[in-house]
Image (spheres, rainbow, N blue to C red):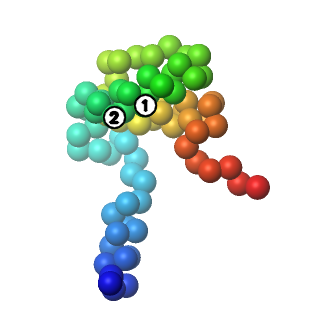
Amino acid sequence: MTDKATQTHARESNMEKDPSTWVTGDEPMTGAQHSYLKTLSEEAKEAFDGSLTKAQASERIEELQAITGRGEPQKG
């Protein structure tokens, strides 16, 4: 079982962080980002840029998710 302090810490550590403040944001995108970004780019019929940093890829993924309807669940 988890206690309330553990649950609170998990929620706080999983909070979305601004990519511009990431310590590793200037590193090349991860393999997972590369793959997902390529898929989203194809679905959105947008150009794929394989040279993005982790932070840039994260922001681009959010943009493409908005275009394709992926990502955030639809509220209704």
Q: Position of residue 5 (x, y in %)?
A: 33, 82
Q: Quadrant location of the N terminus? A: bottom left
- Relative height, residue 14 to residue 24 (above, below): below
Q: Position of residue 67 (x, y in %)?
A: 63, 30
Q: Position of residue 61 (x, y in %)?
A: 47, 33
Q: Quadrant location of the C terminus? A: bottom right
Decide if residue 64 is on the left or right side of residue 22: right
Three-letter amino acid code at the position of disc 1: Tyr
Whole-angstrom CA distance, mark 2 to mark 1, is 6 Å
Q: Residue at x 37, y 60 (%)?
A: 14
Q: Is residue 5 visible?
A: no
Q: Which residue is mark 1?
A: 36
Q: Residue 71 lies in what quarter of the image?
A: top right
Q: Residue at x 40, y 17 (%)?
A: 49
Q: Position of residue 63 (x, y in %)?
A: 55, 32
The reply to whether discs 2 and 1 touch (Cβ–Cβ < 8 Å) is: yes
Q: Residues within 10 Å of mark 1 (few under 14, many from 20)?
A: some
Q: Residue at x 23, y 31 (%)?
A: 27
View extreme (top): residue = 47
Q: Residues within 10 Å of mark 2 (few under 14, many from 20)?
A: few
Q: Residue at x 55, y 30 (%)?
A: 64
Decide if residue 28 is on the left or right side of residue 14: left
Three-letter amino acid code at the position of disc 2: Ala
Numbered disc 2: secondary structure: helix
Q: Which residue is mark 2?
A: 32
